[in-house]
Image (spheres, rainbow, N blue to C red):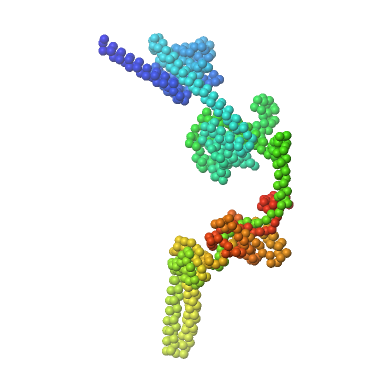
Amino acid sequence: MSQEQRYDKTMLEQTKQQIRTIVNEIAQISRSDVAPETFQAEFMTRVVRALGANGGAMWIADNSGRLTLGYQVNLRDTKLHEDEDANKTHSYLLYNMLRGTETDALVPPHSGGEGANDGGNPTDFLLLLGVVSTELEKVAIIEVFQRPDTNPATQQGFQNFVRQVTRYASEYYKNRQLKNFSDRQNLWTQLEDFTRNIHKTLDLKETLYTVANESRRLIECDRVSLAVCHGGRAKIEAVSGQDMVDKRSETVKLLGDLATAVVKANEPIVYTGDSSNLAPQVEAALEDYVDASHTKMIAVYPLVQRTIDENDHDETERDKVVVPPPFGAIVVEQIEDSNASEHMMKRVEIVVEHARVAVGNAIEHNSIFLAPLWQAIGKSKVLVAARMLPKTIAVAIAVLALILALIFVPWNFNMHCDGTLEPVVRSNVFARESGKVVELYVQHGATVEAGQKLLVLSNNEMDAEYVKTQGEIEEVRKQIVALKDQSFQAKDAEKIRIAGQLAQYQEREKSLLIQKEILDERRDDLVVKAPISGVVMTFDLDNKLRNRPVQPGQILMEIADPDGELQLELNMPEKRMGHIEDYLREQRAKDENFKLSAKFVMMVDPSKNYDATIERDDQIHDRAENRGTDETTVQIIAKIDDPNNLPVGARAGAGVSAKVYCGRRSLGYVCFNEMIAFLQKTVFFWFE
């Protein structure tokens, strides 16, 4: 065997090996679960390379039998785009191949039938055609553009290769069809569960949350929200994965604004990054929400309660029906992925269709006047059934007895409030001057005497003013001495002038001395002293006062006599003061010396109660104040009837719970007086 023959044989083996490798790659791609676009590109690229062809194309058939270009390699080299008649002839060739019974064909260049619809090959290439089909339908046509200057045996080999790879392509589409059937079966199962769950109840809130949560699972998205229209605005009422919606949240408010804009436009929107094609009001609301939530994809669909049967084909009758405005909207979001796949959007459309029916029915049901009452009446017939009648009568008698007791049984009417035990002898220590605390001589619990030094303030401005005044006094006095010396040596005319100057300086000296006296008093006020004898009650004075600036009138500490007599300081809610004043006025008409009585328990020992008396009218303050609580209170001071009976742990500042006696009223009024007052304030008042 010559060297040239061995070289040819080696090249032939290498070529065959390359073709086998490509065929294996095609087979592997055909069995993979890649997207159709990826498969078409990978498949056609390898087929053209394996055949050494000039190009190729894969034409995809849709459900209506129309062919569209899936992927092409060097399709422009055929010059079909330059000749409309040639392009039409080539199209007829493909359509005839799709409708015929043959699965492959080899079409020489510039060949074709005699009729215009027969089709043919108007190109300069040899066309290799293969029909990709499944058991149900023909899905594609593979077309390869091969050079025509090959012998018939080689062309037959090309056709066999195309026939083989066509089977691989058919296998891919068969597997894809099976997967679609499986996905469709899963979808029907999920849809059945979804439909059953969202139509299970007519309670609006429960329906909204069920639709939101079930829709998220069916669509396979990150979040689904439901909005319901209230007076022209759409408000977010349910969000998937949340038990309740925080309507004060800025993000929820912005999403509600977006839903409102979409509902008013009554057109669904799908945003994947580009909002330029939206209405201006929708675009503005969308951008505000996306900036706040960082959502990558969002779809908003209005929910409309349709009044037209979908199967009604009478166009004239349909045009006469007025479609009601949307009653809400459903919002689908993707947080990380901006891709809105066709698979997802089809499921969104299914969800929207079922959601509008379920939510619409729930809204319509809840809009029925006194719906809970009618439901209760409908169920009440069970109560009068023969076996339930004795129980019903017993319950009715019990309810009637309870109502009569609430009306006719008298009960003690007490006004409850909280308070504290406070010493009768106590005083706050105030700052008379502004300054910084530089010395602190007492701590919490220290015993002090009246007039004892408590702390010292420093005031740099006052010190500077004092030094300045002292210096001015000394300067004026020097001037007075100098003028007196001059007066002894001066002549008569000069003495008159000196006497005038001397009088001015003497008046200036008096003014400066008065100013110094005032400064001395103010400097004395920098030394804060105890106003009474007692014990320092304020805690942690070091942190509160040392090296801290204070202002005039600021409370620095409290001094009290904890061993002395204690009294009650009650904070009675203002809304209960009317009952106390009415009762006091009623009793004073009978007895001018009448005094209100109270009982209290201590927080440290609530098992025992103690008596107290409000002895004077001035112990009920005239002014209501807000003492850091949610309601306004009136301070009431009461004297403890038997202070010696208090427990050992009773001390100043101890918390108490008290009740002021206001006579006897019916049990019903005692139990529900605050509810009655609320109704009088919020309901009855507006109808008077």
Tell me: residue 560, above or below residue 486: above
Q: Could you tell whether 611 is left or right of 389 in the image?
A: left
Q: Could you tell whether 528 is left or right of 567 in the image?
A: left
Based on the displayed image, in which of its 4 quarters is residue 377 positioned? top right
Residue 340: x and y, percent?
51, 32
Task: Work out whether residue 149 or residue 127 is closer to the camera in this orientation and state it.
Answer: 127
Task: Work out whether residue 538 or residue 592 is closer to the camera in this orientation and state it.
Answer: 592
Residue 525: x and y, percent?
49, 71
Based on the displayed image, in which of its 4 quarters is residue 21 positioned? top left
| Residue at the image position 60 percent from the left and 60 percent from the top | 610
| Residue at the image position 48 percent from the left and 34 percent from the top | 337
Residue 248: x and y, percent?
56, 45
Tell me: residue 67, above or below residue 651: above
Residue 324 visible from this viewpoint: yes
Residue 82 visible from this viewpoint: no
The image quadrant where one finds the N terminus is top left
Based on the displayed image, in which of its 4 quarters is residue 622 positioned? bottom right
Residue 239: x and y, percent?
56, 38
Task: Work out whether residue 521 or residue 293 is closer to the camera in this orientation and state it.
Answer: 521
